[in-house]
Image: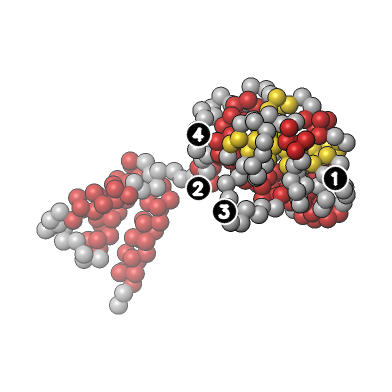
Amino acid sequence: MTKLDTQDLDPQVLTRIRVVLSHTSLPRNIGSVARAMKTMGLSRLYLVNPKRFPDPEAVALASRADDILDNAIVVDTLDAALAGCTLTVATCPRVHEVSVPRHTPRELAPKLIRHAAQGEQIALVFGTEMSGLSNDEVRKCNQLVTIPTNPDYSSLNLAQAVQILAYELRCTLDEGVSHLDEKTELAAHDDIERFYVHLEQALVDLQFLNPHNPKRLMPRLRRMFARIQLEKLEVDILRGMLRAAQEARQIRP
């Protein structure tokens, strides 16, 4: 996957990418598309002559992506949905005679993000559930994208196709998931030194360490804990365990 330097990207970049659904028959597919979009941070949905919209079934399948549906723009023609866009991407699984660049989603996503970051408007165009985009609709676009699938079974539903393209855009914009990591605080030097003092005393109290013949036990334990790079909470847990062991030793008959 091509990586971009995302530090200077406009945070509004995804708001310049619209998903265009042409002549969608089933409202549940519109709702599922809205859910797929919101999951990846896309928000602009254009509907060209949907058979039924708005519709309660679309709301049910949107699964709390109602805002995407509420703000969806319904238009009569594909030209109206593409107005103002510089890059218009037709999703086309089959061989097509149109001589415009054909890409996989992963190949195309960095280009779309770069252009959107420069302030351009981008459209991802999807056809009907049964037959996809017509030849005339494909000709109105200046890019083709094809999702690699099993050549013996290439059936993707509409929401799945949208999800795949939206996912590749998201990964290009931000590949990391470090924001999901638990935020930890490493133990400070003085906290660790107090732990070592406590550890040594506890081992003496438990008669595990002979203070008159300590050998190299404490240096080895220091080396072991240094490899771990203890966190503050971990030091607190370890010292709590040491205190419990010392107290148990004192009350033992």
- Residue 107 horizontal side relative to residue 232, left or right: right
Please, what secondary structure does the residue beneath circle 3 have?
loop
Q: Amino acid at mark 4?
A: Thr
Q: Which residue is label 3 attached to?
A: 150
Left or right, residue 211 beside residue 196: left
- Report how far apart the C-alphas of labels 1 and 4 lie in the structure: 35 Å
The first of marks 2 and 3 along the sequence is 3
* First in residue order: circle 1 vs circle 4: 4
Q: Label for residue 2?
A: 4
State how far apart marks 2 and 3 are (Cα): 38 Å
Answer few, some or many: residues within 10 Å of disc 1's Cα (few below 14, many 20 plus, some between 14 and 19): many
> The residue under label 2 is which amino acid type?
Glu
Residue pointed to by mark 2: 182
Residue placed most toward the observer, 207 or 70? 70
- Disc 3 marks which amino acid? Asn
The residue lying toward the viewer, choosing from 172 and 144, is 144
